[in-house]
Image: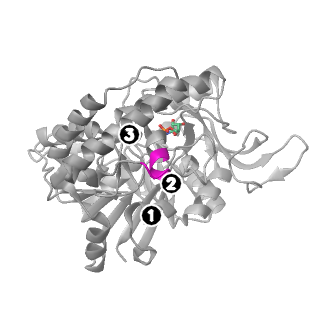
Amino acid sequence: MPLDIIIGAQWGDEGKGRLTDLLAENAHIVARYSGGDNAGHTVTVSAPDGREQIFKLHLLPSGLVQPNTIGVLGNGMVINPARLLAEMERLAALGLDVSPARLKISAAAHLITPAHIALDQADESKRSEAGEKIGTTGRGIGPAYTDKTARRGLRAETFLDPERLGDQMADHIQTANAVLEKIYHQPPLDPITVAAEYTDYARRLAPYITDTALYLHHKLKAKATVLAEGAQGALLDVDHGTYPFVTSSSPTTGGVFTGLGVAPQFVDRVIGVTKVFQTRVGEGPFPTEAFGAEAERLRGTGQNPWDEFGTTTGRPRRCGWLDLVLLRYAVRINGLTELALTKMDILSGLDTVRLCVAYRTADGQTYEELPLGPADLSPFQPIYEELPGWAEDVRAARSLADLPSAARQYIRRIEDLTGLPVSLISVGPERKQMVWAE
Ligand code: IMP
């Protein structure tokens, strides 16, 4: 069965791009099914001339940097065409083919406009005044999905019909202006300027627009391997995440089927990617959050590209210990079949490492499962299991046998507590710094 799914099992930023890039070597197609340029995937790009570069992708599937794959932007995505074209240009400058033969955009994907971005930012400042900020990336994601579900969004297919695009854009900007001016007291946007800008994007992107669900169906029937690339993470899912501190899409496995229009019988592996610790950007409760020197040790200084600072926003990420209550939840709602652990090397040098195995509430009750889902995590205190740390540098390890026994014990404990095998462990930022545990 040829559909493999990569899911972020935490609050995003688990290192999914890295995994996708690796697995894309043996895939025909890599398809993104949700989110937009709120995602940030760091991958190492090998240009056809052999040069390697660290590259940050926000919209294009990370797998596209493998020269033989085809990239799909599915109908579940919200696409900022300006950002997409800029990313395409940067890849093309490295000599990678980003022609319509290699990149397909769903006609049913929704477009992000400057009005969505203005609304997102205005809404965040208003919430901030009331002390109720979500901490969004400010990229217009929420308002674009709001328009989609309110049945007034602009779909990529309008790029195929410039006249309709002009009319729809004028209506859209006028509606958004009313809200911007009356509710948020912000300046209006000029519909003519935005329509002209989008007419230019339409001209450039029209050749890429197609029925990607049909395309994927034919390919899956013909036994092509398709990698569904998640963005964000299970705990940011609009239904299953830490609502309201979530994104506006479905990064969980269910989102693959609606966001690509493919059927579940094609699925083979569902790989959950999790760091060996926990991070979160934006607001919301975080039971295993560490503070002070402990958090700084996990976060890094910001001098290395792999330190815990947002790829999209540059914000320092909140850091803490791996939370198995939340990870087991992610295993269950996504139907994960295996785990990929990332950033194992960061734990080297700690005297002890901690795993949160259950929660305790103020009345002394303990919980191994969330009684009401993850929306309100504020009543819970973590119950930790402490394991011995390891001093050894693990960056050269390529098999389980190369890891110190304390590190192996830590991995085994994660397997025990989730009931899943760990198949891959990243031990450094470079492509080859990976332990294949199978
Ligand atoms: P939005 O997706 O920009 O609306 O942001 C909603 C929430 O999701 C905020 O807490 C963001 O920080 C978070 N978020 C969105 N995308 C990502 C991501 O790729 N990694 C981590 N957090 C994200």
Would residue 371 be found to the left or right of residue 79 on screen?
Answer: right
Would residue 235 be found to the left or right of residue 359 on screen?
Answer: left
Q: Residue at x 32, y 59 (%)?
A: 31
> Is-magenta flag for residue 151?
yes
Q: Is any atom of residue 24 visible in this view? A: yes
Q: Nearer the viewer, mark 1 or mark 3?
A: 3
- SS at badge 3: helix
What residue range appears in magenta? 146-152
Q: Which residue is mark 3?
A: 172
Q: Quadrant of the N terminus?
A: bottom left
The type of residue carrying mark 3 is His
Q: Which mark is residue 258?
A: 1
Q: Residue at x 38, y 42 (%)?
A: 428
Q: Residues within 10 Å of mark 2 (few under 14, many from 20)?
A: many
Tell me if the residue at label 3 has its CB under 8 Å from ligand 1.
Answer: no
Q: Which residue is mark 2?
A: 250
Q: Is residue 194 above or below residue 273?
A: above
Q: Is residue 306 above or below residue 413?
A: above
Q: Position of residue 74 (x, y in %)?
A: 34, 57
Q: Earlier in the sequence, mark 1 or mark 3?
A: 3
Find the distance from the CA under tag 3 to the CA under tag 2. Answer: 24 Å
> Mark 2 near mark 1, Cβ–Cβ under 8 Å?
yes
Q: How many marks?
A: 3
The residue closer to the viewer here, 329 or 214, is: 214
The part of the image, by quadrant, that contains residue 304 is top left
Q: Nearer the viewer, mark 3 or mark 2?
A: 3
Q: Earlier in the sequence, mark 2 or mark 1?
A: 2
Would residue 318 be found to the left or right of residue 51 on screen?
Answer: right
Q: Residue at x 60, y 62 (%)?
A: 333
Q: Residues within 10 Å of mark 3 (few under 14, many from 20)?
A: some
